[in-house]
Image (cartoon, coloured by chain):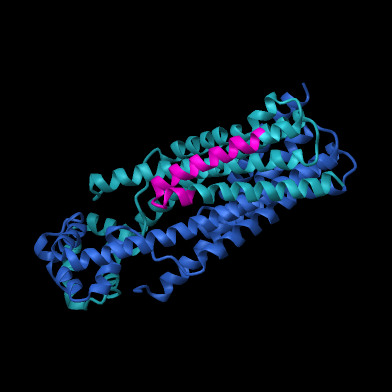
Chain colours: A blue, B cyan
Amino acid sequence: MPQTPHIERHFTSSEIVRDIVIGMADGLTVPFALAAGLTGAIDQTAIIVTAGLAEIAAGSIAMGLGGYLAAKSDAEHYAKEREREKREVQEIPHEEMREVAEVFQAYGLTEEETWPIVQALKRQPRNWVDFMMRFELGLEKPQPGRALASALTIAGAYIAGGLVPLSPYFFAHNTAGALLYSVAFTLAALLIFGFVKGRFTGTRPVRSALQTALIGSVAAGAAFGIARLIGGG
Amino acid sequence: MPQTPHIERHFTSSEIVRDIVIGMADGLTVPFALAAGLTGAIDQTAIIVTAGLAEIAAGSIAMGLGGYLAAKSDAEHYAKEREREKREVQEIPHEEMREVAEVFQAYGLTEEETWPIVQALKRQPRNWVDFMMRFELGLEKPQPGRALASALTIAGAYIAGGLVPLSPYFFAHNTAGALLYSVAFTLAALLIFGFVKGRFTGTRPVRSALQTALIGSVAAGAAFGIARLIGGG
């Protein structure tokens, strides 16, 4: 597969970072918001711990399995489209040659200027198929074993994130006290997570930290308000 | 921006479908699993409704805001990289010409064969920058207004999905009866959602329906088991 080692390394690490971000963003936010919300309505830490752990189990499995199937389905989609391109290159080469030329004509090149590329690809059917996959269809070759790695990364990040806001409820004697620690721990975790995420994704780290903390706070605030409205009424 | 209308239409509809899938997959699964889990531990429908609505509020806001910021950050990333490519094309054109040639050499073309493309792009700096964005960096131009549309689509899908498993708890007199209806409604919704999702994403619909139902069931089963283990103990 024609990819320089540099591009491939970049691709792999960004996929893992993306999976950790997906899992941890929701893991820090949703269980935090749920625990805060329930604290607005229920005065027993045991029920909140039960609900929180049930949520972490459900969320990590749902997101992990979802990630697994999404990666599997990407890989199948790629394989299916590659078979089709392979067939088309063999069966209707002139149509495919026209498509190569069209890719470049969109960038202001004339048909004559694209001619050498079309001719060169025609001599190398395998490279031609790879070229069509990336430049006509915009599909990247999926990494083998991605599906399982993706599932475990997302689920693990969700569990790690979810235990942060829930942990004070394990130890505190009353829900109000637990909520205070939960808010403090989770805000700190959201700020650190947002900062690190910003470093990896190219957003300014401080802004990313504040945005991530904002999402968690707004979600938790809304959950708290709704739960108090219903449960306290 | 050099894109054919066909590609753009495809891009837009697949983005909306993707957002609905993201929101609804989690919306159907996590509140379902939470409600089922709590039914294993708590015998009051009111608490389960409170927890469920708090979860739906938290989840929809967290995912919607997350989608908003992800789309915003994609757009900023694209703009920043485009500025850099623009500068590089002006300041170090020879380096960039070498990079254009490298893109094609990865597909088995010789330097001579890539020459006409490099020369043609050099005469059209704007197209050259667009070309580098897509073919060197693999970045697609983001649609304006995507961030808000994405946020509302994800949040709306999450709420719509989440109300399905929770609705029986509003009306039922006991949690066991509510759980029965919740399982039936949610399984039906997961099967339909999975089937439609398969139609849009190119996976076989029946297989997609079964997979989606499986995710929901496993997540709910795990949440149920964990909640009963803790809450019932």
The spot of residue B222 in percent (x, y) is 70, 51
Where A82 sits versus A66, above or below?
below
Percent from the top left, x then y, of residue B230? 83, 48
- Write down the quadrant of residue A124 in the picture: bottom left
Magenta segment main secondary structure: helix
- Give the side of residue A189 with respect to residue A173, left or right: left
Q: Is residue B190 found inside the magenta-colored segment of the image? A: yes
Q: Is residue B16 visible?
A: yes
Residue A54 position in % (x across, y down): 73, 46
Residue B220 among those drawn in magenta: no
Numbered disc total: 0
Residue sitting at x 51%, y 39%: B154
Lateral position of residue B209 relative to residue B223, left or right: left
In the image, residue B229 sits, relative to residue B125, either above or below, namely above
Query: Is there any visible trace of residue A218 in the rendered image?
Result: no
The residue at the point 60 percent across, 43 percent down is B29
Which segment did they paint magenta?
B181-208
Is B104 in front, or is B39? B39
Residues A119 and B119: in front is A119
Residue A39: % across, % down = 79, 35
> In which image quadrant can residue A3 be found?
bottom left
x 74%, y 44%: residue? A52
Q: Residue furthest top?
A: A233
Most extreme residue toward the right, as rendered?
A: A173
Q: Is residue A10 above or below residue B20?
A: below
